Amino acid sequence: MTIKWTTFCVASIMASIALAAEPVMTPGPGSRYATDAYPGFDKEENIIAQSKKEPGFFSWWSGPKRDNPADQLAWARECAADEAWRKARNAYDALVAEWPTSPEAPLAQEELADLYREKMRDYQQAFEEYKYLADFYSSQCDYDAVVKKMYDTAQAMRVAGKKIVFFRFDNTTDVRRAFESVVVHAPGAEFAPEAMLTVARLRVDEDEYEQAIEVYENLRSLYPGTKQSRDALYEEAKTRMTLLRAHEYNRSRCLDTVAFLKLALLADSLGEHRDEFTAWRDEAVALVEKEAYLAAKFYDSKTRTRSSAISAYERFLREYPASSMSDTVRARLAELKEAAPAQAK
C-alpha cells in the first residue's frame, strides 16, 4: 500500500513538472465524460439529487395564475417589475412545473434563479435553481453562461454564509459542494482550477485533510502549469505536514511525506517555497530517523540479547549515517561491543 501511494505521489508531481510548459488541455465547459473522476469530492450517492419540478398537490393554490406559459411568463415578469418578489418567484416556479417542455420554461427558470440571487439574496437557493437549469435545460440555455453564474453564486455563498432567521451560520459543506458541482459541470472552464482549489481549502477548513490532499493531487494532475497548480503543491505540502505532526509515529506516512517533499522541491521551479519545503523535508526526515532510533533502542534492554541490540544499532547507522542521533548510537554501540567480550568470559 505504501509503495503504491508513494508511486502515485511521484507520478503526480513528475507529471506537473513535465507538463508545466504545456497548455491546459481539458474538456470545454459543456463537455462531460462518464469516466471523469474527482477524488476528494463528495460522492453523488451522498447528495440528495434534484427532482424534476411537478405541479404540487395544492396546484389550485400554488399553480399558474394564467392559462398558458406565455401569459404566465408575462405575469411573473410583471410581479418582478412591481418588486413583488415572492409572487414573482411563485409565478416562475409554477410555470416550470406546469409547462416544463414549453419554450418559456428555461427562460422562467433562469429568471427565477436571477431573482433569488440579485433581488432576494438567497444565494444557496439561487445556486440550486441555476443547477436545475443546467441539468434539465442544458441544450436550451446558454450553458457556459449559466455555469459561470453558478460559480459566481458559489462565491457569494462562501462570503455570505447561510442565514437562518436573523442568524448567520457557516455553511462550509454546502459551499464546498457548490464548487464541486461547478467543476463537474464545467471542467474546462477558465474558473474550474480556482473552483477546485477552493474545494480543497474548504476540506482543510473542515479538518478533512486526507480528502483535501486528494483534491490537491487531482488539481495538479488536471491543470498542470496553472497558478492554481503551483498553489496546490504548496498547500498540499502544508496539509501533509499537518497530518504528519498529528501522526508522527506512522512510519509509512513519514516516508510518504519525505518522498513528496523531495519531489516538491523539484516541482517548485520558481523557487517560491524552497525554504519551507526544505525545512519541512528536514523535519519529516528527523521524524523518520527518530522512529528508526526508537525501534533500534527497543532491542537495547534487559529483556533482549546484547547481540540483537548491536545488530539493531548497526542497521540504524547503515540507513542513517548522517542522523543527528548517529553519534549517540555510535557511542552506545561501542559500549555494547566493549562489554560483549567481558561478558563472554
Image: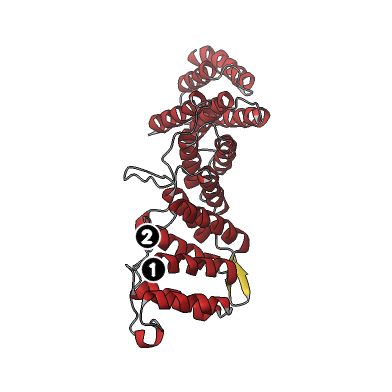
Helix, strand or loop at disc 2? loop
Foreground pick, 286 / 38 = 38
Residue with the mark numbered 2: 137
Q: Is residue 176 above or below residue 194?
A: below
Image x and y of residue 207, in percent? 54, 52
At 49% from the left edge and 23% from the top edge, which residue is drawn? 18
At 49% from the left edge and 62% from the top edge, which residue is drawn? 127
Q: Is residue 322 in sight in this rendering?
A: yes
Residue with the mark numbered 1: 105
Quarter of the picture holding the N terminus: top left
Q: Is residue 223 above or below residue 47?
A: above
138 displayed left or right of 219: left
Helix, strand or loop at disc 1? helix
Specify the amino acid type for callout 1: Ala
Image x and y of residue 204, in percent? 55, 49
Q: Are marks 2 and 1 in contact (CB under 8 Å)?
A: yes
Which image quarter: residue 206? bottom right
Foreground pick, 243 / 49 = 49
151 displayed left or right of 140: right
Q: Residues within 10 Å of mark 1 (few under 14, many from 20)?
A: many
Q: Is residue 297 in sight in this rendering?
A: no
First of labels 2, 1 by sequence position: 1
Residue farthest along the bottom direction in this orientation: 60
Q: Residues within 10 Å of mark 2 (few under 14, many from 20)?
A: some
Q: Is residue 240 above or below residue 82?
A: above
At 56% from the left edge and 42% from the top edge, which residue is drawn? 239
Instruction: Give the colouring mode of the picture.
Output: secondary structure
Image x and y of residue 95, in percent? 39, 75
Foreground pick, 164 / 342 = 164
Foreground pick, 216 / 327 = 216
Image x and y of residue 252, in percent? 46, 34
